[in-house]
Image (cartoon, rainbow, N blue to C red):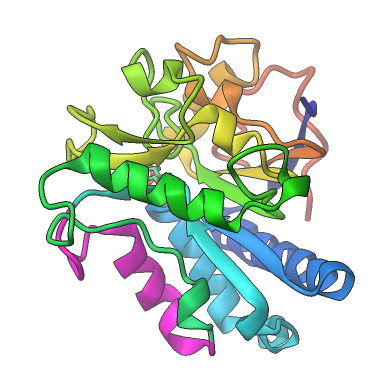
């Protein structure tokens, strides 16, 4: 487990731009040392803000897009192309404007796909895809992602793991079907905390005043069942990227000097 490090930016736009710059460097470095890079995307406002900032960054051309694997931390179980699906929003924000290898874009299944209404089977299929990509060096059934990003919900949820919900207690499976999520839509697919923790680096994104309480709770020693964001950490690094509004309720002992 890595101890969370915090970086606080002036506002959400600067946070998105700085996080995008950080991600470009990570991907370029991983490709230089291992040939490929793997990144897990998040949905939500902050995740999409980062992708839009990446799309606008001239340095995006430093990435070899054909040697990048993209995965998702969670998905809303809706028909293909639904505007509420995380992959649809990611395509709009960035993916449609860069030369990715479609074979390396690992979207989670849609509700009008081969599994129909059986979200459990859809989750199992995604787990199988992850297991296929995991090598012997990957300590299990999930690849060692270079960076896994998570938007933090105002209730401290990450991916589709909600406080006190069964999914946050899962210790065996890497991917689960979620029923009755408190945030619409109720049916979702999510990586579990053990799968999230297989990443080298986990980045938690929190911008906006509505995330302030969640950040303060998760970073003040709350348990992961009550505050799933508290259970999200990477093997070598756990990084909270915040704006000053989201950092406004952090205990003084945690609050770092503001980044410009
Ligand atoms: O529904 C979801 O919400 C969270 C957080 O979204 P935000 O808009 O409050 O930032 C997101 O991380 C997750 O991927 C998504 O499915």
**Quadrant of the drawing holding the N terminus:** top right
Which residue is found at the position 59% from the left and 22% from the top? 231
Q: Quadrant for residue 189, please give it.
A: top left
At x 69% / y 89%, what residue is drawn? 61
247 w.r.t. 47: above or below: above
- Please tell me which residue is depicted at 10% across the width and 45% down the height of the picture: 117
Q: Give the position of the C terminus as an image quadrant.
A: bottom right
Q: Nearer the viewer, residue 160 or 214?
A: 160
User: How far across and how far down the image is residue 38, in percent?
Assistant: 65, 62
Q: Is residue 249 visible?
A: no
Give the residue displayed 83% in from the left and 68% down from the top: 34
Return the residue nearer the eye: 164 or 144. Answer: 144
- Above or below, comparing residue 216 to residue 10 in the picture: above
Disc tally is 0
How far across and down, in percent of the image, does residue 31 sit? 79, 73
Q: Ligand 1 quadrant?
A: top left
Residue 99 located left or right of residue 155? right
- Whether the magenta-drawn stretch holds residue 61 is answered as no
Decide which of 101, 13 is in the foreground and name it.
101
* Rendering coords of residue 111 (x, y %): 16, 54
Q: Is residue 72 above or below residue 57?
A: above
Q: Which residues are magenta?
A: 78-99
Look at the image and tell me whether residue 258 can be seen. yes
Residue 102 occupies which quadrant of the picture?
bottom left
Q: Quadrant of residue 155?
A: top left
The front one of 30 and 96 is 30
How far from the left and from the top, in percent, is residue 148?
61, 49
Q: In the image, 161: left or right of 88?
A: right
């Amino acid at each position: 487990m890595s101890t969370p490090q915090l970086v606080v930016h002036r506002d959400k736009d600067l946070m998105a731009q700085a996080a995008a710059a950080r991600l470009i460097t990570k991907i370029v470095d991983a490709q230089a040392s291992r040939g490929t890079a793997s990144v897990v995307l998040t949905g939500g406002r902050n995740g999409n803000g980062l992708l839009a900032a990446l799309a606008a960054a001239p340095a995006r051309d430093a990435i070899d897009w054909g040697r990048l694997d993209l995965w998702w931390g969670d998905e809303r179980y809706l028909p293909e192309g639904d505007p509420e699906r995380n992959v649809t929003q990611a395509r709009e924000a960035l993916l449609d404007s860069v030369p990715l290898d479609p074979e390396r874009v690992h979207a989670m299944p849609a509700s009008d796909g081969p599994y129909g209404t059986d979200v459990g089977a859809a989750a199992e299929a995604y787990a199988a895809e992850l297991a296929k990509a995991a090598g012997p060096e990957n300590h299990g059934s999930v690849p060692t992602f270079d960076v896994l990003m998570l938007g933090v919900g105002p209730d401290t949820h990450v991916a589709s793991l909600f406080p006190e919900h069964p999914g946050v207690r899962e210790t065996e499976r890497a991917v689960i079907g979620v029923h009755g999520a408190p945030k619409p839509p109720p049916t979702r697919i999510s990586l579990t905390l053990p799968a999230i923790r297989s990443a080298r680096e986990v980045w938690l994104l929190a911008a906006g005043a509505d995330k302030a309480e969640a950040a303060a709770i998760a970073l003040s020693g709350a348990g992961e069942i009550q505050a799933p964001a508290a259970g999200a950490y990477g093997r070598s690094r756990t990084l909270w990227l915040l704006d000053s509004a989201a950092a406004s309720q952090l205990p003084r002992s945690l609050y770092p000097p503001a980044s410009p």
